[in-house]
Amino acid sequence: MSATILVVDDENDIVTTVEHALRREGYRTLSALNGRDAIQLATREPVPDLILLDLMLPDTSGTEICRTLRAAAATRDIPIVMLTARDGEIDRVVGFEVGADDFITKPFSLRELVLRIRAILRRVRTAPMIDAPAVIDFGCLRLDTQGHRTWVSNEEILLTALEFKLLHTFVTRRGRVQTREMLLDEVWGHVPSMPTRTVDTHIQRLRKKIGPASDYIETLRGVGYRCCVSPEDIGRAGTG
């Protein structure tokens, strides 16, 4: 079954052009020109498989819509790609902090847009590794690989699908250095022009969510990241 993509932008020409390009690639589309309609379409069953969300809308901001969708259980795992006419780092940081999966700056290449969407959907649909245990316990951290659920000190923490895969990658590769490029390829499904800063921003957000378990993830300056081999090694971690 082909994926359904919700396109949210207040410029009708952009919506029409993007929808045409996506349908040509075999995707189904929905569209909204404002935040109110976007929320209604995003929360209506069946929910879309991915959302292209303009940062600036007439009635609200894309970041507020993203925050709202991430707070609801039914929509928290939907990949969200922000569309913006601004290329400032602060916009990207705020967008990633509220749960955006990627950013594309206008004007953009339709080919690049399609490639990023394809990579994100491939990553989301990737099944857990067959030989991975159903439940992983690591110190105060517990991961349910089949249900994509996470607990820290017996309290469930709500993670997006991308955040869960990022954490799962660290925990299942304990003691092994993960460069930003490796993480982009493994977790995001690397596509051209995606900045490595994306990794840093998501890891910062993940650390905030998992609290005391964030000490398990060590920053290696100029290299990348590494999960400690055992919880008792956290004296060497939490440096970033």
Image (tube, helix red, strand yellow):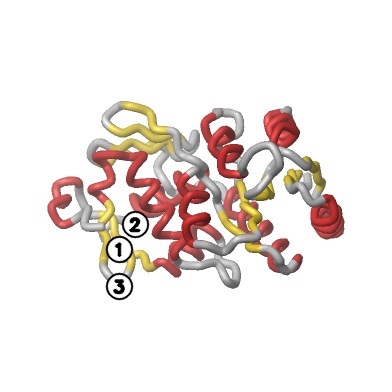
In the rendered view, does 23 fall on the left or right side of 52?
Answer: right
Find disc 2 in the rendering and name its residue: 173
Check disc 3 and report its element: helix, strand or loop.
Answer: loop
* Quadrant where the image shows the N terminus: top right
Using a 10 Å C-alpha cutoff, classify the residue at mark 1 as few (fewer than 14 neighbours), some (14 to 19) or many (20 or more): some
Nearer-the-camera pick, 141 or 8: 8
Mark found first going from the N terminus, 1 or 3: 1
Instruction: Give me the residue at 57% from left, 33% from top.
Output: 68
C-alpha span from label 2 to label 1: 6 Å
Say which amino acid is labelled 2.
Answer: Arg
Q: Position of residue 122 (x, y in %)?
A: 63, 55
Q: Nearer the viewer, mark 1 or mark 3?
A: 3
Inter-mark Cα distance, 1 to 3: 15 Å
What residue sits right under mark 3 in the picture?
222
Q: Nearer the viewer, residue 238 or 165?
A: 238
Q: Residue at x 57, y 64 (%)?
A: 87
User: What residue does disc 1 label?
Assistant: 176
Disc 2 and disc 1 in contact, CB within 8 angstroms:
yes
Residue 91, x across and y down, in percent:
52, 55
